[in-house]
Image (cartoon, helix red, strand yellow):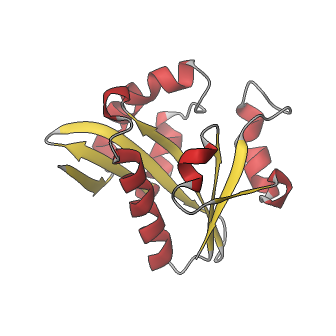
Amino acid sequence: MVEFKKAKLKDISLMQEMIKPEIESGVILPRSNDEIATSIRSYILAYEKDELIGYGALKIYSQKLAEIRSLVIKREFRAKGVGSALVKELLKEAKEYEIEAVFALTYRDKFFINLGFEVVDKDELPSQKIWADCIKCKNFPVCNEIAVIYKF
C-alpha cells in the first residue's frame, strides 16, 4: 500500500538518487540540493513500505495558479496507479490552498488528461516559469513539452 508523506530535508539525497535516470534522459530538469531544500515544503513523497517510489511538487505561482512539477515514479512502480494517486494528492493540496488551477508541462499528456487536465497553449503559462526553469532545458527555446491544466 502506498503512503504519502511531506518531504523533509533528510530526504533530498534519496530524491536526487531516484531522479538521476530521468535527468539523464532529459525528461526532468536537474535541481541542486539547495534548490530542493528551499522548496522542500512543496514536495510530497510516495512510499511503499520503507522504499521511496515516487514524488512530485506543487509550486505555487499566485493565489490562483500552481504547477505540478518534478513528478517521477520509479520504473518498476509505473502503470500501477502510483502516479495518478500522487497527482491526486498534489491536487488535493492545491484545493486546500484554494488555488483555482494547476498546470504541468509534460511529455505524457494522456496521463494528465485521464486525470481531468486539459491541453492548453504554453503561452497561457506564467512567463516566470519560462525564464526560471525552461531556460535550463537542453531543448530551450524549442520546447516539445505539452502544457496541461486542471481547473477546480
Asked if residue 55 lies left or right of residue 113, the reply is: left
At horizontal 72% and vertical 32% (from top left) the residue drawn is: 136
Asked if residue 68 shows in the view, the reply is no
Residue drawn where x is 73% and y is 51% of the image: 129
User: In which image quadrant can residue 90 be found?
Assistant: bottom left
Question: Which of the pair 93/33 is nearer the observer?
Answer: 93
Q: Is residue 66 visible?
A: yes
Q: Quadrant of the C terminus?
A: bottom right
Residue 54: x and y, percent? 36, 40
User: Is 96 rendered above or below residue 140?
Assistant: below
Q: Position of residue 59 (x, y in %)?
A: 56, 58
* Farthest left residue in view: 49
Spot occupied by residue 142 in the image (x, y as percentages of width and height): 85, 32
Which of the 4 image quarters holds residue 49?
A: top left
Question: Farthest residue toward the bottom?
Answer: 98
Residue found 86% across the figure and 55% down from its top:
123
Residue 68 placement: quadrant: bottom right
Residue 132 located left or right of residue 141: left
Q: Nearer the viewer, residue 131 or 75?
A: 75
In the image, is 87 to the left or to the right of 152? left
Residue nearer the viewer, 101 or 43 = 101
Q: Position of residue 11 (x, y in %)?
A: 31, 41
Quick one: 125 or 59, which is closer to the camera?
Answer: 125
Total of numbered circles in the picture? 0
Q: Residue at x 64, y 37 (%)?
A: 107
